[in-house]
Amino acid sequence: MSVKTAGGRVIVRKRRTAAERAKSAVWHAAMLAVLAIVLYPLLWVITASLKGNTDIITDTSLWPKAITWEHFANAFDGLAGIPLWRFFWNSTLIAALSVVGVVVSCSMTAYALGRLRFPGRSAMLGVVIATLLLPGQVMLIPQYLIFSELEVTNTYVPLVIGKFLALESFFVFLYIQFLRGIPRELDQAAKIDGAGHFRIFFSILLPLLRPAVVTSSIFTFIWSWNDFLGPLIYLYDMEKFPLPRLLQSYSNTEGVTNWGGMMAMTLLSLVPVVLFFLVFQKFLIRGIATSGVKG
């Protein structure tokens, strides 16, 4: 089938057969079914936040019989006399420090391991890559003992200090892959002009690493914002709790849980993450695609 446009061009459109249309319909139906399965937990949290505490446990239907906004009103009032904005500020502070630490330390470490030549460089790079195979839970006890001896527990230091020491080896490897796709002639030209390593890195290479910077920033922000285990181990004062740690406070020592308040606070804590992802998602996709073809 051909169609002639106003410009005189002829566009040939192939008519799809019945088998092709059926295959397309089955494909889209399968994708919609997968999407429904993935989004069902989020839909359940939304509807549960609009139910009473008793109905959340006893009512097995998805949709609430009577909608109540009490849980959101109580969530905005805060908890234990502490306003809600304080918990958002704690989470934002931890996430922001984590992002800055990862971008600065991991990018500079990647520059040293990927661009400079010095004895033991290959061995150090191998150790960095090997740490990707080490579960983080293995280091919890020795790390806690170290921070306890340094008397920095119940502070944000244990949660962010590792980000400033390039302990996120995944991002170091990501930056190295990007650096391998940047011609070394840029470094050599800068050295001829008298630039040192810091000038080469910050003025030439770092702007070219923008896709990697955005990718690492997004992942670090999301992981830090949703981190529950770290604040659970190191933070004791409720005034210092981030949002994930706050959710655990809705269950008291007697085993009574405010399910509605927990669901409402969960939705509120998801808003900054979703907005952050929507703003930077195009950079994330571009960064992942670029890292896959370079190196």
Image (tube, grey):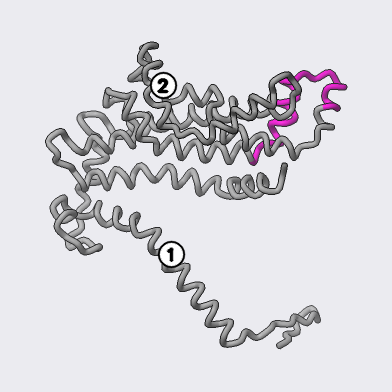
Side of 46 where 59 appears, left or right: left
Residue at screen point 25% across, 62% down: 62
From this viewpoint, which residue is outermost toward the right?
Answer: 192
Taking 180 as reference, is 173 left or right? Answer: left
Residue 95 in picture, x, y percent from top left: 45, 32
Q: Residue 131: horizontal and vertical position, in percent?
A: 54, 31
Residue 214 visible here: yes
Q: CA distance from mark 1 to mark 2?
A: 40 Å
Residue found 67% across the figure and 34% down from its top: 176
Residue marked by disc 2:
143
Q: Position of residue 138 (x, y in %)?
A: 42, 29
Q: Residues within 10 Å of mark 2 (few under 14, many from 20)?
A: few
Residue at 34% in and 44% down:
268
Q: The C terminus appears in which quarter of the rendering? A: top right
Residue denoted by label 1: 34
Please tell me whether residue 36 is drawn above or below residue 70 in the rendered image: below
Residue 86 at least partly seen: no
Quadrant assignment, res 179 = top right
**Residue drawn at (21%, 46%), measured in percent from left and top?**
259
Please state the horizontal and vertical placement of residue 273, each as a whole percent of the image.
44, 43
Q: Comparing marks 1 and 2, which lies closer to the viewer? A: 2
The disc labelled 1 sits on which kind of residue?
Val
Task: Work out whether mark 1 precedes mark 2 in sequence or the reverse, and give the earlier one.
Answer: 1
Hey, which quadrant is residue 208 in on the image? top right
In the image, the segment drawn in magenta is: 188-211
Left or right side of 166 for 236: left
- Report which quarter residue 44 is drawn in: bottom left
Q: Secondary structure at mark 1?
A: helix
